[in-house]
Image (cartoon, rainbow, N blue to C red):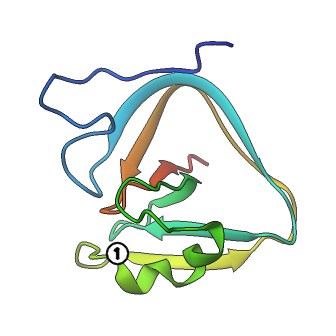
Amino acid sequence: MQLRALLGTWLWQRSVGDRFHVPNSVHRETVYLFKAGRPMYELVSNKGEIYRIQSYSHIVGKSLSIDDLAGRGQRLRLPAGWTYKVRILDTDSRLEVRGTAQVINDEFENTYQLIVH
């Protein structure tokens, strides 16, 4: 077992923040590998920032499965100008951070990390 992330929260906060679609700083070193030919789920902010899903949760949607993520965008209450997009990757893709990641969660407590180009 290895330490992968540190979350700085207050006792009354959720582990990834207390508001949805708001960036939270997470100090960590992680690499997520997304395989070509697989679906990718992303939130795009009204500023064009892309947040890629890194995990989905059963906290709110107890019966949620990975197969449900394709239609999940229709059930999200996104801020004005935000979109949920599903696409198939043409090539393998890495989502890597060595330091501070910007992570948001949606109202189903799925988490997404900002893609930094």
For label 1, the residue is: 82
Mark 1 burial class by Cα count in 10 Å: few <14, some 14-19, many 20+: some
Specify whether 26 is left or right of 32. Answer: left
Along the viewing direction, whichever of 28 and 47 lies nearer the viewer: 28
Specify whether 88 is left or right of 117. Answer: right
Q: Is residue 109 above or below residue 6?
A: below
In the rendered image, residue 13, in percent from the top left (x then y), is placed at: 18, 33
Q: Identify the residue shown where x is 43% and y is 62%.
A: 62
Q: Is residue 112 above or below residue 77?
A: above
Q: Identify the residue shown where x is 30% and y is 62%.
A: 107
Along the viewing direction, whichever of 78 and 11 lies nearer the viewer: 11
Quadrant assignment for the N terminus:
top right
- Residue 66 is drawn in which quadrant? bottom right
Q: Residue furthest top?
A: 2
Q: Identify the residue shown where x is 36% and y is 32%.
A: 25
Q: Is residue 63 above or below residue 51?
A: below
Q: Amino acid at mark 1?
A: Trp
Along the viewing direction, whichever of 32 and 101 lies nearer the viewer: 32
Specify whether 2 is left or right of 52. Answer: right
Q: Identify the residue shown where x is 47% and y is 78%.
A: 72
Along the viewing direction, whichever of 116 and 20 lies nearer the viewer: 20
In the rendered image, residue 11, in percent from the top left (x then y), is placed at: 15, 23
In the rendered image, residue 111, in percent from the top left (x then y), is placed at: 46, 51
Q: Residue furthest front?
A: 63
